[in-house]
Amino acid sequence: MNAIYFDDYAVGQSHTTPGRTITEADVVFHAGQIGDLYPHHLDEEWSKDGPFGTRIAHGTLVFSIASGLIAREINAVSFSYGYDRLRFVRPVHIGDTITVVVEVTEKRLDPKRDDHGFVHEKGTVVNQRGETVLVFTHIASVEISSGLG
Amino acid sequence: MNAIYFDDYAVGQSHTTPGRTITEADVVFHAGQIGDLYPHHLDEEWSKDGPFGTRIAHGTLVFSIASGLIAREINAVSFSYGYDRLRFVRPVHIGDTITVVVEVTEKRLDPKRDDHGFVHEKGTVVNQRGETVLVFTHIASVEISSGLG
Amino acid sequence: MNAIYFDDYAVGQSHTTPGRTITEADVVFHAGQIGDLYPHHLDEEWSKDGPFGTRIAHGTLVFSIASGLIAREINAVSFSYGYDRLRFVRPVHIGDTITVVVEVTEKRLDPKRDDHGFVHEKGTVVNQRGETVLVFTHIASVEISSGLG
Amino acid sequence: MNAIYFDDYAVGQSHTTPGRTITEADVVFHAGQIGDLYPHHLDEEWSKDGPFGTRIAHGTLVFSIASGLIAREINAVSFSYGYDRLRFVRPVHIGDTITVVVEVTEKRLDPKRDDHGFVHEKGTVVNQRGETVLVFTHIASVEISSGLG
Amino acid sequence: MNAIYFDDYAVGQSHTTPGRTITEADVVFHAGQIGDLYPHHLDEEWSKDGPFGTRIAHGTLVFSIASGLIAREINAVSFSYGYDRLRFVRPVHIGDTITVVVEVTEKRLDPKRDDHGFVHEKGTVVNQRGETVLVFTHIASVEISSGLG
Amino acid sequence: MNAIYFDDYAVGQSHTTPGRTITEADVVFHAGQIGDLYPHHLDEEWSKDGPFGTRIAHGTLVFSIASGLIAREINAVSFSYGYDRLRFVRPVHIGDTITVVVEVTEKRLDPKRDDHGFVHEKGTVVNQRGETVLVFTHIASVEISSGLG
């Protein structure tokens, strides 16, 4: 596992994750796992006549998969503190492919812990047409480098 | 499906959802679905020596299941706008049971849409020992009642 | 959880459940879970040349999902005693959407338990073309109301 | 695939299927797949204080798995017509192992189809302590042998 | 369970298994279960521009399902010793249907165990167009018949 | 994605993957997915009296997960050609944790493709007690570096 310290992050840094196609199996399983059985997730006939014309993925599914796409780069000295301003911008349909653009937007020391700082990363989830479907700000609590040098 | 309009919500209202036990199957499946394969979710031997002494559930899993517990009460005139101040307070372990206390904390008109308002619901996710493990504020966009009366 | 007592049921009452689209993921998973691996469920090439022209869902899958659609309305004073006359009328294909029409067809006291009665509900499972695919009679054992009034 | 014709069945024949342990993963997945999210299936804390002292498997899960245990012996000239007198006798808990005793109890010609007959098989599902947990009568529609001999 | 002894196998014997359609749900679940999240399995947009024009199934998924197709014929006196010369010949796509041609290619006594011999079975996995997609040699350790006769 | 060329591999190089605990959910799902329903995977009561005293994981499950553990380090210029000498050494039980020791054991040019070579990696899968449970040799076909320098 890699270690990326607080000092290694710079505001303005950004990268794009690999993509992930949201499948029908994902939607059906997530619906069951969380117990959100709304017809716009599970009933194609009902959804045909609705505003989107077909079933949509759960917001929590899109968010969870986006979070996982970011987490593929393990950082052993960081842990997830929370998220701010999670906003569902557009629906995601079965068969859409999402990627996440991640940008460091803020760094600040943790007033309660000398050896940790907060790194804010804005996540912008886009579909295969380049449309933004979800945004959020991830707050990571990261160790400050040892300063041994 | 029920219809609960903006005017039907009152700040201070609260209720508690049913409970849900977080199982090993949930953690294993969620890890695979989102691709977050950190050893503290999937490697019991590694986790034994870590800070928690055993595997922990993904924050996104706890959040998704909490969101689903709330969603069991379908409201046909409300949709999920987003979430604010999602904070991971304590780890959730395999076998823990969570419930969500939901409280309306704020109501405000939507400046962009005459016929909709925002309802803020604070979700406090607690485990079987009454400890808070996760908090968040859900923002729902809700239709304003027709005022036919 | 709601409580609907024996006296609250009336022969002739009926309602229709939400719909549920039967997906390929449902069929594949159910096949594995129950170990029914017949080619008309899992082999599309074989099924093309069969009587239905494509794969069909397991009868137990359709029945289980129909049972779950009914169970979304939890009744805390009722439990499932059994089923009579379960009949597979037409095949259900991947992509079909089912709903259940539920009608109370019979009520009778339980000769062995003073405080319980049996409520018979006929379930008629229909697809998106209005064709009946499955019928059954559900027998619920329901508490008789306390008569406090 | 084997072919066992109507004439090959004899009233009184019986056999016992292999066993299957009902796991927590089975219960969690089945709950989500059918949308039956009752706390006695998914909430261990709630179930501790209930009549059974722990979570129970869904009746439809036990029935489906029992049906699958029987179906492992494929009969190419038989199809499932329906079930009668399905009765839930005892709860099945996570970790219980079920087997099915299958006995041919009745044979009768199909008045509507010259070349088919009905074979009734009584299924008795027992747990690892030999207790009956579920009974049902399976009705198979079976081809009558060609009489070439 | 059947018992097929070492002496019952003859070099040159062959049979063909039932078929199995590889579904999107299979690929998505296998990806998560084993943690192989390469974009040619999970990202349809990326795969469109790749050498195969669409997503492909994992080699381990095709191999596992092929192994399972063979295993449907339980032999109580045989266990799996290993595999030789597993070769991925062609990609398998979502929706392809595979069958396995199994041929006994070699028999030899086990120098370390008097009462066991090795049976080599060549598995040739073919798709619905008759193209070979995977080959392997399965080595089974099989009991030598009791010689009671 | 990284690119590790043929010339970057050296015989004798080795590394150890992260660990993965094999859960009951993994075994149940893999059994269903591949259709290998042997009682030593799915019937705890039967397994108690068998040689291992409890259920065992499928060899294909252990192999697939081991393969996935190795695949977490994506190499964009390598693809999997096949496997040799896969041998099941010891059973893996539910709850065991496996890791894979990977060592480059051979390199050779591909006689049919000028720009590719074969890299042989021996995989030794060990459990939490350090016992070897599975071995195999992975054969990768890797691009030869461009030699631009």
Image (tube, coloured by chain):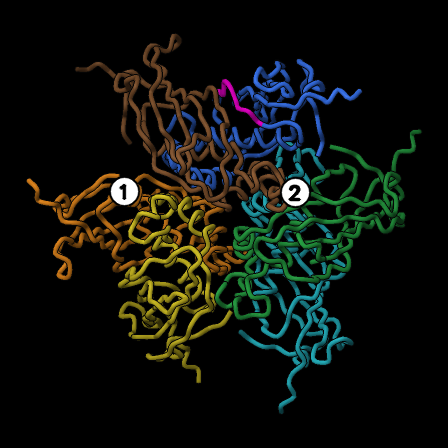
Chain colours: A orange, B yellow, C cyan, D green, E blue, F brown
Find the residue positioned furthest to the bottom.
Answer: C149
Which chain's residue wears label 1? A
Q: Is residue E85 magenta?
A: yes
Question: Could you say which is closer to the camera, residue C74 or residue A89?
Answer: C74
For the stretch drawn in magenta, the main secondary structure is strand
Q: How many marks?
A: 2
In the rendered structure, which amino acid carries the disc numbered 2?
A: Asp
Q: Residue at x 67, y 80 (%)?
A: C144
Give the side of residue D28 with respect to residue C110, left or right: left
- Vertical comparison of E95 with C145: above or below: above
Where does the image place residue F106, in percent across and percent down from the top left?
35, 15
| Residue C73 quadrant | bottom right
Q: Quadrant of the C terminus of chain F?
A: top left
Q: Is residue E78 in view from this perspective? A: yes
Q: Which residues are magenta?
A: E80-87
Residue positioned 76% across, 36% down in the render: D76
Q: Residue at x 30, y 17 (%)?
A: F11
Q: Is residue D26 magenta-colored?
A: no
Q: Can you identify the residue that label 1 sits on? A: A74
Q: Which residue is mark 2?
A: C36
Q: Chain of mark 2?
A: C
Same chain for the residues under marks 2 and 1 in the image = no
Residue F17: percent from left, percent from top:
34, 33
Question: On the image, which quarter does residue C94 sit in?
Answer: top right
Q: Is residue D29 above or below residue E63?
A: below
